[in-house]
Image (cartoon, rainbow, N blue to C red):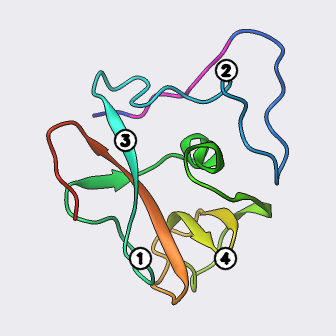
Amino acid sequence: MGRRPYCKLGSAPMPRVGEPFGADERPAAGAGSGNHTSFVAGEPGANSCPPGAVAVAELECRGLPKEFTGTLHDPFIENLADDPKGCFKFENGYYFNKHPTGSPRSMRTPYCKRTSGTVVG
């Protein structure tokens, strides 16, 4: 399953940090994969997705405040060994950690997606 970028024709700007996607700007669930997906919060303090779930891409992470609650942290993108890898929420802010391994850290909750047919938790 390859990754495909989410592209949209038009001049709508990318949401600013701290501002959720508008309903018409959210990436479609499973964009490019042909599978229906839904987002799921992982275990607080974990550094990976629960069984049956996979990491979300940066663009999908940007849309999570609209799916759940919270805002995009400023800065949104980080590269830190002591935070979870990928998309996670700390307090009320979403972050995207590009560090290749990351680490489990208390009070950080990874956000993931599952494909149809899998049961998480």
Where is mark 3, residue-wise? 38
Where is mark 2, residue-wise? 24
Q: Quadrant of residue 95?
A: bottom right
Q: Position of residue 49 (x, y in %)?
A: 33, 64
Residues at marks 3 and 2, CA–CA distance in whole angstroms: 17 Å
Where is mark 4, residue-wise? 91
Name the one closer to the observer, 52 or 7.
52
Check if residue 88 falls in the magenta segment. no
- The answer to whether the residues at label 2 and label 1 have Cβ atoms under 8 Å apart is no
Q: What is the number of callouts on the image?
A: 4
Q: Indicate the quadrant containing the N terminus: top left, top right, bottom left or bottom right.
A: top left
Q: Is residue 36 visible?
A: yes
Instruction: Please identify, in this view, whether the residue under mark 4 or under mark 1 is nearer the observer.
Output: 4
Would residue 53 appear left or right of 79 to someone viewing this image?
left
Label 2: which secondary element: loop
Name the one closer to the observer, 91 or 98.
91
From this viewpoint, which residue is outermost toward the top? Answer: 9
Where is mark 1, residue-wise? 47
Looking at the picture, which amino acid does disc 4 mark?
Glu
Q: Position of residue 88 (x, y in %)?
A: 55, 66
Residue 119, above or below 108: above
Q: Nearer the N terminus, badge 4 or badge 3?
A: 3
Q: Nearer the N terminus, badge 4 or badge 1?
A: 1
- Part of the protein shown in magenta: 3-8
Q: Nearer the N terminus, badge 3 or badge 2?
A: 2
Looking at the picture, which amino acid does disc 1 mark?
Asn
Label 4: which secondary element: loop
Looking at the picture, which amino acid does disc 2 mark?
Asp
Residues at marks 1 and 3, CA–CA distance in whole angstroms: 19 Å
